[in-house]
Amino acid sequence: MGIQPVSRENEMIQVESLTKQFGTFRAVNGISFNIARGEILGLLGPNGAGKTTTLRMLTGFLKPTSGTIRVAGQPMSDQGLAVKRMMGYLPESAPLYHDLLVFDYLRYVAEIRGLKAGARTERIRRLAEICQINDVMHKPIGVLSKGYKQRVGLAHAMMSDPQILILDEPTSGLDPNQIVEIREIIRQIGREKTVVLSTHILPEAEATCDRILIIHQGAIVADGATDQIKRSAAGGHRIHLSIANADPGAVRSRLATIDGVAEVITEASVNGVLAVVLVCHGEADLRGPVYREVRHTDWDLLEFYQETQTLETIFRKLTRED
């Protein structure tokens, strides 16, 4: 029996209470999440967090100790082979035959994936364009840079035109230019497919992914778009102002009346300029109301910005050993 249409239309993958135990060590600890069709999901975490184990269970390479994985509405346990046919998988070290020419290798992959003879060349040509490997198609894989090898591995993973693409550390070991190139390829692929990738390169995840899962010690510690995670981790935010020609007491009493401002902190600085910090609660952006309040005074507004946490800071807070 083939894969049946998903009942919840926008969800491609559903993971519930997924656990993987190796002896006494629990690598993945009861995680649950859904992945939407056409979404690029980034799986972040320090080394040993459980990222690769999770990806291997999603692809059917490892059997979960407990929990369920559903792909297109069907349990992985019931439809393992059919589910695997929907996926392309690129492990951290792409399994390539280094003695083969790129074209010969991709033709071999097309054959074992069951592409009909008339469709193989066209599919290889299309993948060469998507993965930007046209200029190395007749070179041995062994002489290619790691960046090109990763692109050949991507072409391999996409040979059967899978609906889901799973990538384990796709930019690991690449130089900055190669990272940008692979990122653009992934974003292009993500316009048509569901993509799940693991990485520990935080700017890469922020620039590439629609949504991020942060995993620590086998458990999910954050889930959402980057901006959502920043706001949630901050528990609110702060707005900084530098104001001249203003009385500190008047500043505190006036700005404290703004809905959402929990506290107004003032500190005199050099040349009579007042440093002001507004401690805000909730997720609402209060810069507009603050600016309008200041505009109705005769104060001189010299500096005005909202403090935000970086993804790196949040990642470090969420993945500390304690």
Image: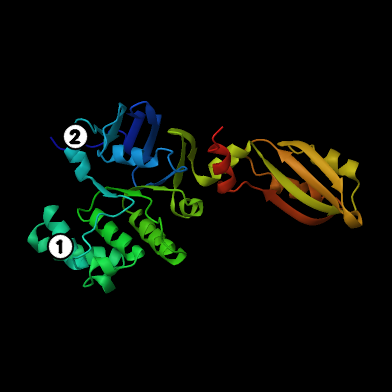
Q: Nearer the viewer, residue 193 or 43?
A: 43
Q: Of discs 1 and 2, which sits in the foreground?
A: 1
Residue at 44 percent of width and 66 percent of height: 177
Q: How many marks?
A: 2
Residue type at mark 1 is Arg
- Is residue 7 placed above or below 172 in the rendered structure? above
Residue at 26 percent of width and 32 percent of height: 63
Give the residue furthest to the left.
Answer: 117
Residue at 34 percent of width and 38 percent of height: 53
- Position of residue 65 in the picture relative to residue 211 (left or right): left
Image position, residue 243 (x, y; %): 84, 53
Mark 1 neighbour class, 10 Å CA radius: few under 14, some 14 to 19, many 20 or more: many
Give the residue furthest to the front.
Answer: 23
Residue type at mark 2 is Gln
Residue at 34 percent of width and 50 percent of height: 167
User: Which callout, 1 or 2, points at the residue further toward the start of the chain?
Assistant: 2
Quadrant of the rendering where the N terminus is positioned: top left
- Residue that label 1 marks: 107
Q: Nearer the viewer, residue 30 or 296?
A: 30
- Position of residue 192 in the picture relative to residue 296 (left or right): left
- Residue that label 2 marks: 79
User: From this viewpoint, is residue 1 visible?
Assistant: yes
- Position of residue 29 in the picture relative to residue 148 (left or right): right
Image position, residue 45 (x, y; %): 46, 42
- 1 and 2 marks in contact (CB < 8 Å): no
Judged from the image, the secondary structure of the residue bearing numbered disc 2 is: loop
Judged from the image, the secondary structure of the residue bearing numbered disc 1 is: helix
